[in-house]
Every structure is written in C-alpha cells, then in structure tokens.
Image (cartoon, grey):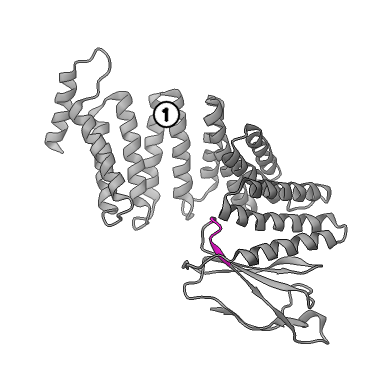
Amino acid sequence: MSLKGGPIQVLPLNATSKIFVYFNRGRHDGNGTWISIPLREANPESPATRWAFDKPISFPEGLSQIVVVIVVHSQTMGVLGHLRQGRRFEHDENEANLEEATSAISESIQLSPPDDEVLATRFWQLGALLTLRFNHTGDPDAIRAVVTAQKKAVELATTANSPSLPLYLEGLGFSGTRLFMRCKVPADLEESMSTLERAIELTPVDETEAEALCSRLGRLGTALLLKHGLTHQLSDVQAAVDARKRVVDLTPKNFEAYPARLSLLADALGHRFYQTRKIEDSDLEVATREQVIEVSPKSGPDLWRCYSYLGTTLLDRFVRTEKVEDIRRSIANYREAIRIAIEDATVLPTLLDRLGTISGIILHGHRRPGRDRRSDLRSAQGYLDVS
C-alpha cells in the first residue's frame, strides 16, 4: 500500500516543508517508525497544488493499524490524515525523525501568529509527539514536558473559547494520571481528576458526543481507583463504580467495546468488595463477570481471560462464604479458561498454577473460626469425588 506521489491540497507548503509519517503498531507503546519525505515543486502557477511528494510513500507489508501523516514547516503544522489497516508490522524506531519533527513543531510555535486557537492546536500536537517519546523512554521528564505542553494548549483554548477544549482537557487529565503513575506524587493525581471532571462537565450529553463522554468517564474511573489505592476511602471506589457504570449504560450492547467496558465495571465492583467485604458486592461482581462472558465473542482472543476472572471472583467469594458451590464453579471456569488457552504457552502455566492453588484449598480445607475442620474436608472431598 502507498500514498501516491502527487499534489498536496490540504495545507499551504513551501520549500522548507517536511512530511513526517509515523507508523504505529496499533499499541500506545511508542514502538513505531518515523520516516521523512521530501517535497518537490510540482505546479508553480497554482498555490493550492504547488508542492507534491517527491516520490510515493510505500508502506511495508503488514501495514500498521494507524499511520499518522504530519506536515511541518515554519508557518504551518497539521495532520494530513489517517490510514487504517488491520495488521501490525515490526520495524525499528527512528528516533532521529521523531526528534526532528518535535523540533520543527517547536519552531513553528515560536514563529506562529498570535492566534490563540491556532497556537492551542500546535501545543496540543507538540504534546502528542512528546507523548510518543515518553511511551518509548518512560522518562519522567518526558511526561512532565507532555503535561506542560497540554496545559498551554488548554490555557489558549480556554481563552479562545475553542470547541476543542473538552478534548484538550481529557488529554491533559490522562497525561496527569500517567505522571502520577510514573512519579507517585498525589497532587498530580488530584489535578488529573479535577481536569477530567471539567472535561466531563463540558461534554454535551447527546449521541454525537457519547463516545467522547465514555472515554472521559473511563479515564476518571481509572484515576479514582488509583486514588482509592492511596486513601482506601469507600467514597473513591464508589465514585469509580458510578463512572464505569455510566460508561456501560452509555454503550450500546452491540458495540465492539461493550464487553471490555463491562469487564472494567466488574473490576471496580471487585475493588468495592475488597473494601466492604459485603457478600452482595461480591454477588454483583460475579453477575457482571458472567454477563461479560455472555456478550463476548465466542472466538475472541481474550475469552479465556473472562473465564479466568470469573474463576478468581468465585474463589474470592468462597473464601468469604465457604460455600462448596463457589469453589465448584471457580474450578469449572478455570478449566474452561485452560481449554480455550491450551495452545497459548504464555498464559497456560499461570492458569494451571491458579487451578493448582484452588485444588490446594480444597485438599487442605478452609474454615472459619469455630467450625470443624473435618467437616470442611468432607465437603471439599465430596466435590472432588464428583468433579
């Protein structure tokens, strides 16, 4: 597949313009490839089509999931377009081109006219390039630079009353969460949450913005669970459950992301159960994980994971209730996970180890204070005899 050489009609270009193409492997880990494409003067009489690719851009076999084409020069920076293809490919990163693109955008910011909305866009796109650097290096200074650029974009977009402000706030909030995860400064997490809450407040509640709202609520839910890890306050985990429940409610059941969002809700319910130890919270998590299995594609690559999570949830409930039916169902779900993942050498040992742990619980008994151990063993052995 290739972008054919020919006139570019999207942005005004000149002889100093550069085309940067970034191949992303379909993951947000910074493992991609940058290439730089020179331009040639194709039609001097027509400003709209004067500059063209010097040659076709050929993409390797097994094109990446996302390809972003960025045009940079001293006066103009923008995204030319996106190409999507299902397969991933493997290539070494070319950091020199990433650095060149970042430097060129920084220069274009310095030379830009004093237009708040245009500048906001450029700072936002600078943040996007800096994010790629952080994804690749994990350097704390890199994510701090992302936050600095995105804060400037938010500031300028607020002044310009830009319709892109909710998007910029979401990105800044998410970057703030990643900064907290890297540096463990609670103030960064608090700022991230307040930024995401502002993004949600500014997002219209209608069908056209439903996906944007789901994304922002989902990121707020993640930040709230991180905060719960610091505070152990029930209010934080409850707010995370509420945010993720709202995401599920906003998502059509036939939407591809529905099972994953339902699973994230189950995760939040599991955190709440660990906090409250109320059996009704565990029951709700079990029911939600059962629903995840019902709505997941039967040939999906992660189906084994759904059965494994349900098995773990049932085991947690068994530890709380000591009902033999819970351990019976836990083992049945782990066995199904193993059956599905039988040829996956990367996960099979872990699943077998977990099943062995459950068997150990059965063989050695798990009893509450004051309860006869022999009674526990008889109940467990009775299950082994019929399983």
Does any portion of residue 204 appear in the rendered image? Answer: no
Q: Residue 249's spot in the image, x, y percent?
A: 52, 43
Q: Answer whether residue 376 is magenta in the image.
A: no
Residue at x 62% of width, y 52% of height: 207
The answer to whether one can see residue 81 in this image is yes
Q: How many numbered dots are placed on residues in this image?
A: 1
Tell me the quarter of the image containing the C terminus.
top left
Position of residue 177 measured from the top left corner of the image (x, y, whole percent)? 61, 41
Identity of the residue drawn at 64% across and 51% down: 209
Q: Is residue 106 left or right of residue 56?
A: right
Identify the main secondary structure in magenta.
loop
Q: Pick the residue in front: 235 or 358.
A: 358
Residue 194 vs residue 30, the one in the foreground: 30
State the image coordinates of residue 10 (x, y, percent, origin top left): 73, 73
Expressed as whole percent of the image width and height from the top left, the position of residue 204 reads 68, 47
Residue found at x 38% / y 41%: 289
Q: In the displayed orientation, state which residue is furthest to the top.
A: 370
Q: Secondary structure at mark 1?
A: helix
For label 1, the crowd category at 10 Å Cα-Cα, with few meaning under 14, some 14 to 19 and many 20 or more, is: some
Question: Position of 206 compared to 280: left or right?
Answer: right
132 to 383, vertically: above or below: below
Left or right placement of residue 362 versus residue 121 in this view: left
Choose top left, top right, bottom left or bottom right for residue 285: top left
Q: Is residue 360 above or below residue 89?
A: above
Task: List the residue tagged with mark 1.
Answer: 281
Query: Which residues are the magenta region?
Result: 28-33
Looking at the image, is 165 positioned above or below residue 224? below
In magenta stretch: residue 31: yes
Residue most extreme to the left: 385
What residue is at 78 percent from the left and 83 percent from the top? 50
Check disc 1 and give the amino acid type.
Asp
Quarter residue 200 falls in: top right
